[in-house]
Amino acid sequence: MEILMFLKLKLTILNLIKKFFKNITVATDGKDGLDKYNKHYKKNEMNFDIVFTDISMPDMDGHQLIDEIYKLNREQIIVVVSDNQNSNVLIKLIDQGIASFILKPIKNDDFVRVLYKISS
């Protein structure tokens, strides 16, 4: 599986994701992530299997990134990992069509449950 994740998600999350996936591309912010998303498709003629992102990022926030990715691939699986519990933010994410939301700090059981859900 090919994974795109954002550095803002911290090394503890990266280490957790590394337990499940070998091919991980790390982006520093939303613009970098969108650029890597596009380059990955052009090089491999396939999208990432899963995109993990946060909401708050420099240069392009998570909402903007999700919108841009969905313009390219409406079927992309996107998981948002965030400590933001604002109901308006969560409703917007649901309206955008994300696959799942994981609240920080991540609990291993929550992470495994989400992976199971999106891979089923």
Image: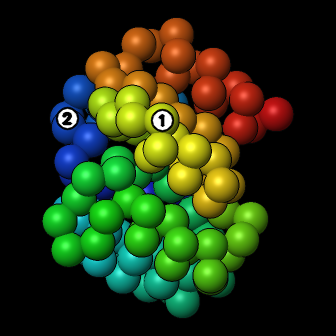
Estimate the x, y position of residue 86 in percent, counting from the top left.
39, 35
Residue occupying the far front of the picture: 88
Let me know if residue 90 appears in the view. Answer: yes
Q: Which residue is mark 2?
A: 11
Image height of 35 relative to 16, above or below: below
Task: Report the side of 26 relative to 118 (left or right).
Answer: left
- Residue at x-position 73% and y-position 29%: 117
Judging depth in this view, the residue of 104 and 112 nearest the camera is 104
Task: Report the side of 19 relative to 54 (left or right).
Answer: right
Instruction: Say which element carries label 1.
Output: helix
Q: Quadrant of the C terminus?
A: top right
The kind of residue on which mark 2 rests is Leu
The kind of residue on which mark 1 rests is Ser
Estimate the x, y position of residue 62 in percent, counting from the top left.
38, 59
Tell me which corner region of the image, top left, top right, bottom left or bottom right, holds residue 48: bottom right
Tags 2 and 1 in contact by the CB under 8 Å rule? Answer: no
- Residue at x-position 62% and y-position 81%: 71
Tell me which corner region of the image, top left, top right, bottom left or bottom right, holds residue 69: bottom right
* Disc on res. 87: 1
Task: Report the side of 47 relative to 60 (left or right).
Answer: right
Image height of 111 relative to 23, above or below: above
Estimate the x, y position of residue 63 in percent, counting from the top left.
43, 62
- Residue at x-position 63% and y-position 47%: 94
Name the N-terminal-most of marks 2 and 1. Answer: 2
Residue occupying the far bottom of the picture: 42
- Residue at x-position 42% and y-position 71%: 64
Q: Nearer the viewer, mark 2 or mark 1?
A: 1
